[in-house]
Amino acid sequence: MAEVILFVAPPVIVRRFQESCLADPPFQVYALSDLIQAQAFVRQQTPAVVVVVDPKGNGQQVCEQLRKHGTFPLIYIGSKDATAETIAGILDRGADDYVPSDVTPRELRARIRAHLRRARDYAHAQRPVLSYGPLEVDRDLHEVRLHGTALFLSPKEFALMEYFVLNADRVVRREELLQQIWEFPAGLKSRTVDVHISRLRRKLGAAGRDVDITTIPGVGYKLSLSGE
């Protein structure tokens, strides 16, 4: 299902951006020029992103009113000659991003996608139970389960599994783990990561071989499912 993007702007302005926003992957674009209608829309539809286009720079109230109805990313397109004070006022009233009115459709689409990515990452990070295939990391119980069976992990092993699940779509470098999990200063060498990874592999293997921590030579580690 296409993600919903609401433009609060006259339709003639929205048409400038619409072709780019409908490109692959598509967005479902709505345009409303009336604040009352826009407020009703965000209450009923929960858009993925709201874009307020206001080149005259009078949109602080619009941002403030829309922000009352949700935590969606709100991008404000305003005057390219706006002062730092004006921009700060817009951001303080609820906008997440200020973009000058000469922004290209391609750049606006990139900004929309970046905000969507951050919103998804934040929502994922706030969940009490994180999952990756048959693996679950329960933050409330401070427990890791594989196929429903709890693994007996030390606090550092739990922190490692949590970090791997939160970053399951990428390779995690050894230096990053030392800084994020052990709070070691940058540049410090230690084999403690390798020791803990070895222990985790044994515990994951004992509970089932569907999830593993793969070594990417010369780079770091990545959480993986069997068959990947």
Image (cartoon, grey):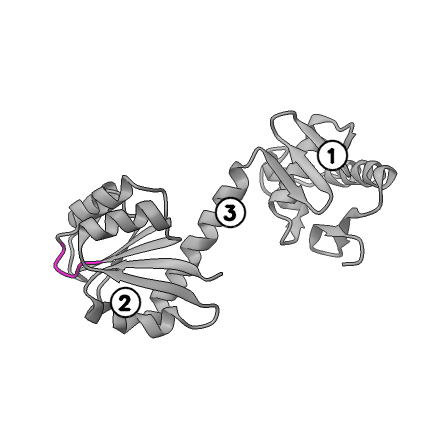
- Which mark identifies residue 194? none
Residue for badge 1: 145
**Circle 3 crowding by C-alpha within 10 Å: few under 14, some 14–19, many from 20:** few
Q: Is residue 92 above or below residue 32?
A: above
User: Chief secondary structure of the magenta span?
Assistant: loop
Say whether residue 75 is left or right of residue 151: left
Residue for badge 2: 103
How far apart are labels 3 and 1 at the CA level? 22 Å
Q: Quadrant of the C terminus?
A: bottom right
Q: Position of residue 225 (x, y in %)?
A: 76, 52
Query: Who comes first in sequence, dot 1 or dot 2?
Result: 2
Query: Who comes first in sequence, dot 3 or dot 1?
Result: 3
How far apart are labels 1 and 2 at the CA level? 47 Å
How far apart are labels 2 and 3 at the CA level? 26 Å
Q: Amino acid at mark 3?
A: Asp
Range drawn in magenta? 53-57
For the residue pair 222 and 149, the one nearer the viewer reads as 149
Q: Position of residue 101 (x, y in %)?
A: 21, 64
**Circle 1 crowding by C-alpha within 10 Å: few under 14, some 14–19, many from 20:** some
Query: Who comes first in sequence, dot 2 or dot 3?
Result: 2
- Quarter of the image for residue 208 reads top right
Residue at 37% x, 72% y: name it: 20
Q: Position of residue 75 (x, y in %)?
A: 30, 54
- Which mark identifies residue 121? 3
- Quarter of the image for residue 216 reads bottom right
